Image: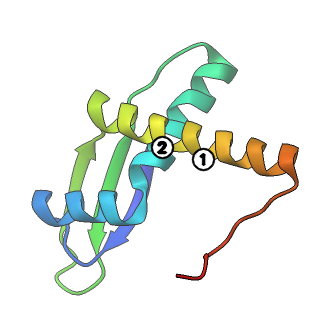
Amino acid sequence: MADLKSCVDASSRGFSRAIANLGYDIQAAFYVDGMKAVTGKELPFLFVAVEKEAPHAVALYRADPEIIEVGRRKYRAALQLLKWCQDSGSWPAYQPG
């Protein structure tokens, strides 16, 4: 599986920041787990990073197992929170103070 991402900085360091800041780890884990649920196969997940400005440098990164596992923990926690909100009828937002 591969996902094309536009970015400001396609270098390893720059794109690592984008993964963390934009939740790409969550997306990758969700896609990997979804594909496994449908096909029974755990496929590698690749990011194709393309810089938005000329000369439009391109880099290919494979999401390593640690990134997938971090993303998996994040999306599972989000699903637990969603379930709690649905069950309790409470949808907390920003709290004063």
Q: Position of residue 11 (x, y in %)?
A: 12, 63
Compared to 66, does 38 lie above or below?
above
Circles 2, 1 touching at the beta carbon (< 8 Å): yes
Amino acid at pointer 1: Ala
- What SS does tag 2 mark? helix
Q: Position of residue 6 (x, y in %)?
A: 36, 71
The answer to whether any part of residue 7 appears in the image is yes
Q: Position of residue 76 (x, y in %)?
A: 57, 36
Which of the two residues, 5 or 77, is positioned nearer the viewer here? Answer: 77
Q: Residue at x 16, y 82 (%)?
A: 55
Q: Residue at x 53, y 15 (%)?
A: 41
Q: Which mark is residue 78?
A: 1
The answer to whether any part of residue 1 appears in the image is no
Compared to 24, does 36 lie above or below?
above
Amino acid at pointer 2: Lys
Q: Which mark is residue 74?
A: 2
Q: Residue at x 34, y 66 (%)?
A: 21
The answer to which image quadrant residue 63 occupies is top left
Q: Which mark is residue 32?
A: none
Which of the two residues, 77 or 29, is positioned nearer the viewer here? Answer: 77
- What SS does tag 1 mark? helix
The answer to which image quadrant residue 54 occupies is bottom left
Which of the two residues, 55 or 78, is positioned nearer the viewer here? Answer: 78
Task: Give the class, few, some or many, for how many residues have Cα within 10 Å of label 1's Cα (few <14, many ≥20).
Answer: few
* Left or right: residue 92 compared with residue 25: right
Compared to 15, does 38 lie above or below?
above
Task: Give the class, few, some or many, for how many residues have Cα within 10 Å of label 2's Cα (few <14, many ≥20).
Answer: some
